[in-house]
Image (cartoon, rainbow, N blue to C red):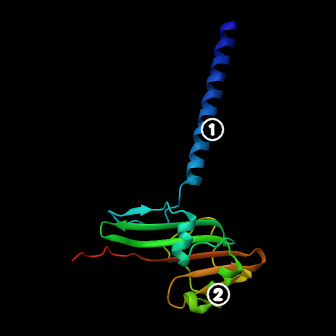
């Protein structure tokens, strides 16, 4: 009887430890998935992905200026696919509480050529996936949507929360040729 009790106690302890180990392993995998960037650009054979941009650098490359003291970046991510001959594609996404100055500048058509879009075109091609925190363009949300008539820059501004979602994508740049 004592031996059976010891064996069943040992089996129960082993099962509990195995369950704890599996739980910790799944938790670690979930945490890794949450912190790993989403690959938004499908890579061609031989291409590499760069996705380790600081939020300030994403902002600077997007708006050609450094964030102002009152611009608060909530989320920002940029992807570039490249091969030995240069960058082939890029895409970025941002979620910002913009300053009044930045918002005024972005709404001015002379800055980036953005206009209010009453019938917005899809902001992304079908093979690019936005991050989970980035909303789909939705005219019913009450947000202002600004787009460039012939380029890909799209802004979605929610005035009630002073929240700006911005995205852009394009083809890359070839390396310069030396003489």
**Residue 26 visible in the picture:** yes
Which of 5 and 134 lies nearest the eye of the viewer?
A: 134
Mark carried by residue 23: 1
Residue in the image at 72% along x and 82% along y:
140
Q: Is residue 1 above or below residue 161?
A: above
Picture quarter with the C terminus: bottom left
Q: Residues within 10 Å of mark 1 (few under 14, many from 20)?
A: few
- Residue 122 in percent (x, y) is at 56, 82
Q: Residues within 10 Å of mark 2 (few under 14, many from 20)?
A: some
Q: Residue extending furthest front?
A: 69
Give the quadrant of residue 89: bottom left
Q: Is residue 155 above or below residue 85?
A: below
- Residue 39 in percent (x, y) is at 49, 62
* Side of 47 where 160 appears, left or right: right
The reply to whether dot 2 and dot 1 touch (C-beta < 8 Å) is no
- Residue 76 in percent (x, y) is at 58, 66
* Side of 58 where 174 appears, left or right: left
Q: Which residue is mark 2?
A: 107
Give me the C-alpha separation between circle 2 and circle 1.
49 Å
Q: Secondary structure at mark 1?
A: helix
Which of 3 and 33 lies nearest the eye of the viewer?
A: 33
Q: Is residue 134 above or below residue 64?
A: above
How many numbered circles does the render carry? 2
* Side of 137 where 112 appears, left or right: left
Q: Residue extending furthest right?
A: 160
Q: For the residues carrying marks 2 and 1, which lies nearer the camera in this image? A: 2
Give the quadrant of residue 103: bottom right
Residue in the image at 44% along x and 62% along y:
50
Picture quarter with the N terminus: top right
* Side of 179 where 73 appears, left or right: right
Mark carried by residue 92: none
Mark 2 or mark 1: which comes first in sequence? 1
């Amino acid at each position: 009887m004592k031996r059976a009790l010891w064996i069943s106690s040992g089996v129960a302890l082993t099962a509990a430890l195995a369950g704890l180990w599996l739980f910790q392993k799944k938790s670690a995998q979930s945490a890794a998935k949450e912190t790993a960037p989403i690959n938004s650009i499908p890579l061609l054979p031989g291409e590499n992905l760069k996705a380790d941009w600081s939020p300030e650098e994403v902002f600077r490359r997007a708006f050609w200026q450094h964030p102002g003291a009152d611009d608060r970046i909530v989320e920002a991510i940029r992807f570039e696919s490249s091969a030995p001959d240069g960058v082939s594609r890029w895409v970025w996404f941002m979620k910002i509480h913009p300053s009044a100055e930045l918002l005024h500048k972005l709404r001015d058509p002379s800055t980036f050529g953005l206009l209010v879009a009453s019938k917005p075109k899809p902001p992304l091609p079908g093979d690019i996936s936005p991050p989970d925190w980035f909303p789909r363009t939705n005219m019913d949300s009450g947000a202002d949507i600004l787009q460039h008539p012939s380029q890909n820059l799209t802004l979605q501004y929610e005035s009630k929360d002073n929240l700006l979602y911005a995205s852009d994508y394009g083809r890359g740049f070839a390396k310069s040729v030396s003489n």
